[in-house]
Image (cartoon, rainbow, N blue to C red):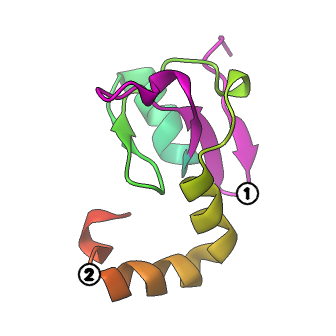
Amino acid sequence: MTSTDTTTEGDIRISPVPTDDGDHERFSHYVDKDKITEAMVAGTPVVALCGKVWVPSRDPKKYPVCPECKRLFDLGPEGRMNEWESRGDYGSRQ
């Protein structure tokens, strides 16, 4: 792979997030590994566990992990589902 390789943790890969609010240099985020691979090939955006949306293009190993992504990842699938349902955002996270 190229310099856009991602780090795998279970079924999630970590990838950096460029955004308009200037944090594109700050964190790597958790994303479903199948979606990150597709995004890197096709140039389509992905959605991180924390809700960030971006097109992956940077080496995630250069950045610390997003604290919110890490917290949600540690909850596990059931914990995330419970939290998103309680907040009413289930439909926007997949």
Q: Give the range drawn in magenta.
A: 1-29
Horizontal side of 48 relative to 66 (left or right) equals: left
Q: Residue 10 shows which numbered tag?
A: 1
Q: Position of residue 16 (x, y in %)?
A: 54, 30
Q: In which quarter of the image is the C terminus?
A: bottom left
Q: Which of marks 2 and 1 is nearer the N terminus?
A: 1
Residue 24: which numbered mark, if any? none
Q: Which of 17 and 23 is in front in this view?
A: 23
User: What residue is at 59 percent from the left and 46 percent from the top?
Assistant: 66
Residue 34, placed above or below residue 37: below
SS for tag 1?
loop
Q: Does residue 20 lie above or below 10 as drawn?
A: above
Q: Quadrant of the N terminus?
A: top right
Q: Distance between the residues labelled 2 and 1?
A: 26 Å
Between disc 2 and disc 1, the foreground one is 2
Q: What residue type is labelled 2?
A: Gly
The amino acid at mark 1 is: Gly
Q: In this picture, is 19 found above or below 78?
A: above
**Residue at the spot x=36%, y=88% of the render?**
86
The x and y percentages for residue 72 are 57, 66
* Residue located beneath label 2 in the image: 88
Q: Is residue 30 above or below residue 10?
A: above
Q: Residue at x 58, y 34 (%)?
A: 27
Is residue 18 rendered magenta in the image?
yes
Residue at x-position 35% and y-position 22%: 43
Q: Position of residue 6 (x, y in %)?
A: 66, 31
* Mark 2 surroundings within 10 Å by alpha-carbon count, few (fewer than 14), some (14 through 19), many (20 or more): few
Local secondary structure at mark 2: loop
Residue 15, quarter of picture: top right
